[in-house]
Amino acid sequence: MAKRGAPVHIDDVIAAIETARDKVMADEVKSLVKLGLPKNVAYKMVAERYRQRGSEDENAEGEQSPWVDMS
């Protein structure tokens, strides 16, 4: 039978997921920039892929993410 470890708080799980997502997004932006895309275009492409608004799109109307911003 498997042993149970100490319980993990849900906030720790969410923080780990967000950290991993941010790292993957940063790696994808770096890869797109290496291919010759401007950094702001690469960032927008990656943000759209992860259904998040880019930093310069925060005040844009019409597009709302289905994901709740928990930051």
Image: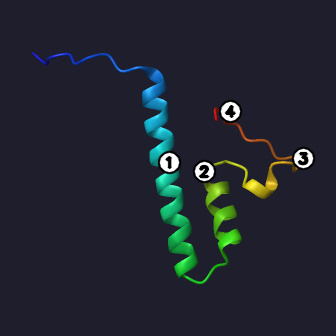
Q: Label 2: which residue?
A: 50
User: Within 10 Å of the Cα at label 4, are there few (<14), some (14-19), or many (20+) other Cα atoms?
Assistant: few
* Amino acid type, callout 1: Arg
Distance between mark 4 and mark 2 Cα atoms: 12 Å
What amino acid does circle 3 point to? Glu
Judged left or right of residue 29, residue 64 is right
Name the element at disc 4.
loop
Q: Are marks 1 and 3 in contact (CB under 8 Å)?
A: no
Q: Identify residue type, mark 4.
A: Val
Write the residue at 66% across / 36% down: 67
User: As shown in the figure, which amino acid type bears the numbered disc 2?
Assistant: Tyr
Which sits earlier in the primary sequence, circle 3 or circle 4? 3
Q: Can you say whether 44 is above or below 18 in the image?
A: below
Q: Earlier in the sequence, mark 3 or mark 2?
A: 2
What residue sits 48% from the left and 35% below the top?
Answer: 15
- Residue to which mark 1 is pinned: 21
Instruction: Name the residue carrying label 4.
Output: 68
Circle nearer the N terminus (1, 4): 1
- Tell me whether circle 1 and circle 2 mark residues in contact (CB < 8 Å): yes
